[in-house]
Amino acid sequence: MSEQTRCGFVALIGAPNAGKSTLLNTIVGAKVSIVSRKVQTTRALVRGIAIEGPSQIIFVDTPGIFAPKRRLDRAMVTTAWGGAGDADVVALLVDSKKGLDGETEAILERLKDAPRRKVLVLNKIDLIPRENLLSLAQEINARVPFVETFMISAAKGDGVERLRDHLAGMMKPGPWLYPEDQVSDAPLRSLAAEITREKVFERLHDELPYEATVETDQWKQMADGSARIEQTIYVAREGQKKIVIGEGGRMIKSIGQAARKDIAEAADQKVHLFLFVKVRSNWADDPERYREMGLEFPRGG
């Protein structure tokens, strides 16, 4: 490793479902953030770490920024802007197909005065004609001065390498903050809980409100090198518990099989996963739950 290493933080911000988690996983080359069709699935700041030449880029995948209605919403939005404020570079991700909608307009308004260097990333470019893409880029750049504009498809990987190269060059000279082989600073227990939550939403995104949450209760290393993991899926009402378990236990079995596969890959070991479902009403008003998710508890109603 040459002494001229570079290191810095890049905050990925944008409206819900702009593709931030997909982009983060593509750049890092591993699952570090959960992806779901359900909006607002990323709750706390998830850090993914990428190496490009002498540069270590620490990506902060913030929760989607939207108009908050409930206490949990407010906590997530505050966290998102906090992540943007602490970063060396702010990357605004925009869903090209949606274009300049109200949520993106509001973000641009707030970004105007942000002192950080900013890059614009137009995502899902495969879904709209090129001329629409160019006019969208011009319109957004006319409102906020971005140092560079990138056009990508996070899901297909198109344009992602150029974006990563450019961001690597924007990092400041300095020592790396993480070991070379580390792809995330999220502890395995919390990453495992997020993976299971992703599987719950993949299967039940229409039936279940996004407040459903998962906690890893036990992670026990076994003598044969495998891990025994116990997790609890918390829902708000008894009726939701029945939905998660499914007829004859089929739904929770399906969730468990899918989660076990991804957790084993993340942990790089065989895992035995045991899932339980419990009702915990009004958890969205419990400060302790927010601390566990890495969010600040907002006061007031």
Image (cartoon, rainbow, N blue to C red):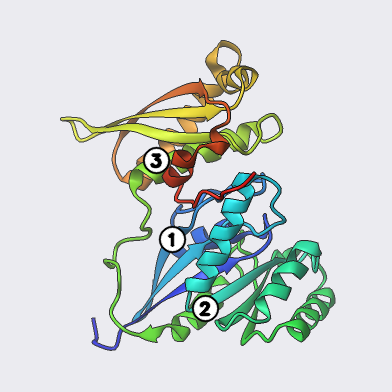
Query: Residue 292 location in percent, x, y?
Result: 42, 43
Location of residue 81 by image quarter: bottom right
Query: Residue 118 location in percent, x, y?
Result: 59, 81
What's the residue at 63%, 49% (across, down)?
73
Location of residue 122 by image quarter: bottom right
Query: Type of residue at label 3?
Result: Ile
**Please, is residue 163 above or below residue 189 in the view?**
below
Mark 3 Cα shell of 10 Å, populated few (<14), some (14-19), many (≥20): many
Quadrant the C terminus occupies: top right
Quadrant the N terminus occupies: bottom left
Given residues 133 and 91, the one toward you in this image is 91
Circles 1 and 3: CB atoms closer than 8 Å: no
Question: Alpha-carbon distance for marks 2 and 1?
Answer: 14 Å
Query: Type of residue at label 1?
Result: Arg
- Relative placement, left or right, of 105 versus 60 is right
Question: Alpha-carbon distance for marks 1 and 3?
Answer: 17 Å
Mark 1 Cα shell of 10 Å, populated few (<14), some (14-19), many (≥20): many
- Relative placement, left or right, of 192 versus 253 is left
Query: Type of residue at label 2?
Result: Val
What's the residue at 32%, 61% (across, down)?
182
Decide which of tag 1 and tag 3 comes sooner along the chain.
1
**Residue named by callout 3:** 263
Query: Residue 16 location in percent, x, y?
Result: 67, 55
In the rendered image, the residue lying farthest to the top is 248
- Relative placement, left or right, of 138 versus 280 is right
**Please, is residue 251 above or below residue 247 in the view?**
below
Q: Which mark is residue 89?
A: 2
